[in-house]
Amino acid sequence: MKVTARPSPWSCCTTSCSWSLSASPATNFGHSLAAGHPWEGLLAFALVMFATVWAWINFTWFALTFDTDDWLYRMLAMVQMGG
């Protein structure tokens, strides 16, 4: 049986982007703990993760509800992820 390569789904790219986005606040939280300011670090981490998850849920809902899968939508989504 021959196995053919499949392109990775769009969700894999955006999921890895969201995980890499959470790495910076986690590192800053570690620095805050080492400096003796655990609540400041925890608050900053919680706010960044809340904003990330909120944006991810809204983006996923829009993509699934309206099913826009054309090239323009994909390019604009990549521009948005780039900032």
Image: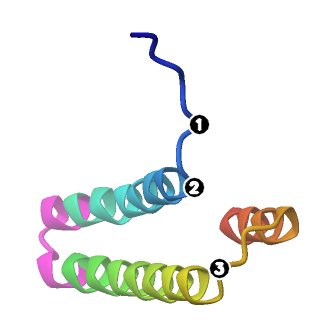
Residue 54 in the image: x percent, y percent? Answer: 42, 88
| Distance CA(mark 2)–CA(mark 3) | 13 Å
Tell me the element at label 1. loop
**Closer to the camera in the image, 13 or 27:** 13
Which residue is under mark 1? 7
Please name the residue shown 52% across and 20% down the image: 4
How far apart are labels 1 and 2 at the CA level? 9 Å
Which secondary structure lies at badge 2? Answer: helix
Q: Is residue 30 magenta?
A: no
Cα–Cα gap, marks 1 and 3: 19 Å
Please name the residue shown 13% across and 76% down the image: 38
Q: Is residue 79 above or below residue 48?
A: above
Q: Circle 3 is placed at which residue position?
A: 67
Magenta residues, start to end? 31-40
Q: Mark 2 or mark 3: name the one nearer the start of the chain.
A: 2
Question: Which residue is situated farthest in the front direction here?
Answer: 1
Most distant residue in the top direction: 1
Residue 19 in the figure: left or right of residue 70: left
Q: Quadrant of the C terminus?
A: bottom right
Within 10 angstroms of label 2, few (less than 14), some, or many (20 or more) residues? few
- Residue denoted by label 2: 10
Give the residue type that dot 1 points to: Pro
Which label's residue is closer to the chain start, 1 or 3?
1
